[in-house]
Image (tube, rainbow, N blue to C red):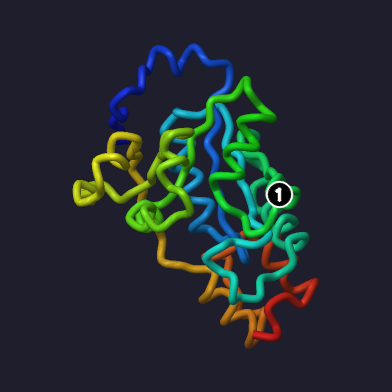
Amino acid sequence: MRMSLPQGEDPELNRSIPKRVGLLGGSFDPVHHGHRFIVDSFLKSQLFHEIWILPAPDPPHKQQKQLTSFHHRVKMLELAFRQLQEIYINEIEKELPSPSYTLQTVTELQLKHPDCHFFFCLGGDSLRDFTNWYRYEEILDRVVLVVAERKGVDLNGLPDEILHRTIQVDHEPIETSSTSIRQIAGGDTHRLSQRDLHKKVIDYIQQHHLYREE
């Protein structure tokens, strides 16, 4: 595991805080092994006591896309992660104004849980796009970013304001995506593979006839 502390972060101070929580957001439509593997990489970093997964009811970057119901996406997340004690599915974004901006989510969580020290977890592709996020400078004021990225990938092209608030952990991504899974399921859900999805998630998709319209 390769990790560097951003400027201004005191590791001794971090260890003294009762609970360090990594936040991982997304649409998870559906949750797949790529999500599971990136969570494993975050857990292996030993930065966190817990990781809270934040399914977005209405992601701002997917306003034109019809998402599977929030209820179904949450149920699939619970099935995929139920065996990991450090993982919690947090539905706070369902209670917040739409669309689901990261800034408002982080702000609300910090108000509700002043005993927690939050980090925001994301993949390398999301980090490279971070300057396009809604009021991203204010997100950086509130949380340190933790990015899971393949070893040897150079992030130095990013603005210093982001690099100074970023911790990098090693991660080997797998080749799968929610889009490709939905396309497969749209033709025949029995073609879904446990190489991409937890078996219980496959069973859930088949039971509830999800993605057939695609």
Specify the quadrant that holds the N terminus: top left
**Residue at (20%, 51%) from the top-left corner?**
157
Q: What element carries label 1?
A: loop
The kind of residue tagged 1 is Leu
Q: Give the left or right position of residue 66, taking residue 164 as reference.
A: right
Q: Which residue does the image show at 20% across and 49% down from the upper left? A: 154
Above or below, 67 relative to 90: below
Q: Which of 63 and 46 is in front in this view?
A: 63
In the rendered image, residue 176, in percent from the top left (x then y), is placed at 46, 67
Residue under the image location 65 percent in, 29 percent down? 111
Q: Quadrant of residue 23?
A: top right
Residue 139 in percent (x, y) is at: 47, 41
Report the residue at 34% width, 35% height from top: 165
Picture layout, residue 178 above or below residue 185: above
Q: Which of 193 and 162 is in front in this view?
A: 162
Position of 104 relative to 21 (above/below): below
Left or right of 98, for residue 9: left
Image position of 201 with respect to 7: above or below: below
At label 1, counting other C-alpha atoms closer than 10 Å, the crowd grade (few under 14, some 14-19, many 20 or more) is: some
Q: In which image quadrant can residue 187 be found?
A: bottom right
Question: Can you give x and y, in whole percent of width and height, for residue 193 in the image?
Answer: 57, 71
Count of all numbered marks drawn on residues in the image = 1
* Residue 194 in the image, given as x and y percentages of width and height: 58, 65
Q: In which quarter of the image is residue 8?
A: top left
Q: Mark 1 points at which residue?
A: 96
| The C terminus - image quarter | bottom right
Q: Return the residue nearer the eye: 96 or 184.
A: 96
